Image (spheres, grey):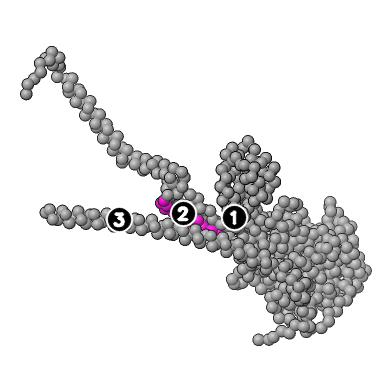
Amino acid sequence: MKHIKSPLLAENLPQWRSRVLLLLLLAASVALVVRALYLQAYQSDFLGDKGKARYERVLEISATRGKVVDRNGDVLAVSTPVKSIWAVPEDAKLTPHEARELALLLELDVKELNRRLASEKDFVYLKRQIPPDVADKVATMNLAGIHQQNEYRRYYPNGEVTAHVIGFTGTGDAGQEGIELALDGALTGKPGSRRVIKDRRGQVVEDVESIRAPQDGKEVVLSLDAKIQYLAYTQLKQAMVDHKAKAGALVVLDAKNGEVLALVNSPTYNPNNRVKLAGAQLRNRVFTDTFEPGSTMKPFTAALALESGKYRFDTPIQTAPGKLTIGTATISDAHVHGLLTLAQVIQKSSNIGISKVALSFKPDDMWQMFDKLGFGSPLKLGFPGEVGGRLRPAKSWRPIEQATMSYGHGISVTLMQLAHAYMAFARDGDLIPLSLTRLDSPPLVGKPVISAQTAREVRAMLEMAVQPGGTAPRAQIAGYRVAGKTGTAHKLEGGAYANKYVASFVGFAPATDPRLIVAVMIDEPGGAAHYGGDVAGPVFAQIMAGALRTLGVAPDAPLKPLQMADAVKEGV
Amino acid sequence: MLRFNVILLLVAVICAIGAVNSNHRARKLFVELEREQARMKELDVEWNQLQLEQSTWASHARVEKIARDKLGMKTPAPGQIVSVEK
């Protein structure tokens, strides 16, 4: 090879310069390798994710809220998909013809539609929760700037009949009242998600994987019987009109297994349309409101008397002269009855008779009995807002208070507590927990409260109360033996008892082997009648007769014309 | 040695085609599954709507009204009921 003679090359460069250059080049390539190793080995997951994020998307899959059905599978609450139409006003440039057509589909006024589309906002709802078929028609119009979104809407086919049990859901399909709130956890579905590959225009090109399958909410089977519930609703509503009452409540229990078969409040509301909802309509007098029960409490004191052994069914008690002074207060009966047996005290509902019985016991004995029966503490059925009523500690009872408590004043209870306590009489002395959901098998063990013998004797007394000579002959039912007790309580207003009443009736049938317990409460009957036997008794009889027929319970009494004698006025 | 290599190459090619094929089938099945799931959801929605419709038609208020007004039915008096013992 021939070398070119160059004056530049002729110069002898120092040896170190080429070495330094070589070293620099080597160092640079080592740095590159290290960097490559670092990215490949330590950062590969992070970078891989970043890459995927450019084309992969995670889609949410919605889950439906569970149904609520009654014990026979009739639907009481169900969610169905609906669509909401929304618009980006800036993008929506509709021709007058298109606007007219859209307004017609959405059942909106054209002016209203144009006003919304003229809004300055980026997002406006045009119409929420419309049926999917209407939404499809809107979609086929293919309008720019008009979009749809999927939503769910809860429907209650029985409307106001079941309003107070089922409750309703609020925004976002979350339970807000009643069963919808109590069992929200089970009813709510868990939305799932899946990973897809989307192209530049946002269309799904390929499915990658399902990350989490959506879990629909569970179906809740209530103990309610829609037939009995409807019957209870119509009868209570009728009674409200007949007696010009302010409010009313009613509950039907199965004495055999503790299931709640019907629960009605009046006034009620339509859960499908809650625009004009007022506080009074929302009140649930079965669970969350307490009242002074009046004479419906008397059988519990009678049970205490029998249980102690100090009294028998026919122990005589002097109620003459119809007035009894305890301390500075005087209590009275509506009628002067004279000498009554313990059973007759219950039958005729004598305040003086039961007060005398009550005062022969220590306050603590009475408190123990009331406490065992569940008064003063919530039933813990899981219903939202459940209260326990008021039962003051026995230490603080004055004799007059002990006397009035025996006939249901100075103590407050919920209607559910009262119905539950009567279960002790209907079930040979034990109490089983109540249930709002259908049970496959009845609870095996009950909590014994009184002896079976006492329960049977009180049952006999309660049967006398609905027969001629008792306070509620109008609670009789043809073909069945009925046992029950009336209550007529003065209402407390601003610390004093006013001339307003709460009429109630609690009873069970058939008396030979009680199957159903029905408790009725009518608040402030404004008509001519205000006694429990006249106001609440007939409601009880109607519902009990209908419910027994619905359930096919065999009659236990020979059929004979009912003797509807005038009711004995009970002590108020 | 060369023959062995060719065989190995063939095996590798077959495996590769198999992998592509099963991947393709998996995707097709996945799409099918998705479609069936969507259909299931659709049917479920329809079932809910039908149940809603049924309970509206069969509401106790409506049945009672028709039974009383249209068919002239009434609740039997206690004396008209004969219970059949088993």
Q: Which tag is nearer the camera, tag 2 or tag 3?
A: 3
- Residue A163 part of the magenta-drawn span: no
> Which chain's residue wears label 2?
A
Same chain letter for marks 1 and 3: no
Image side of residue A298 versus residue A66, left or right: right
**Residue sitting at 40 percent across and 44 percent down?**
A52
The secondary structure type at the circle numbered 3 is: helix
Highlighted range, magenta: A206-217
Numbered label attached to residue A548:
none
Which residue occupies the foreground of this view, A530 or A29? A29
Q: Which residue is mark 2?
A: A212
Numbered label attached to residue A132:
1
Asked whether residue B10 appears in the rendered view, the answer is yes
The amino acid on which the numbered mark 2 sits, given as a three-letter code, is: Arg
Q: Earlier in the sequence, mark 2 or mark 1?
A: 1
- Residue A209 part of the magenta-drawn span: yes
Q: Find residue A266 and report its horizontal and vertical position in percent.
A: 77, 60
Asked whether residue A126 appears in the rendered view, the answer is no
Mark 2 Cα-neighbour bin, 10 Å: few <14, some 14–19, many ≥20:
some
Q: Which residue is mark 3?
A: B19
User: Does the residue at mark 2 contact the one at mark 3 (Cβ under 8 Å)?
Assistant: no
**Residue sitting at 71 percent across and 53 percent down?**
A274
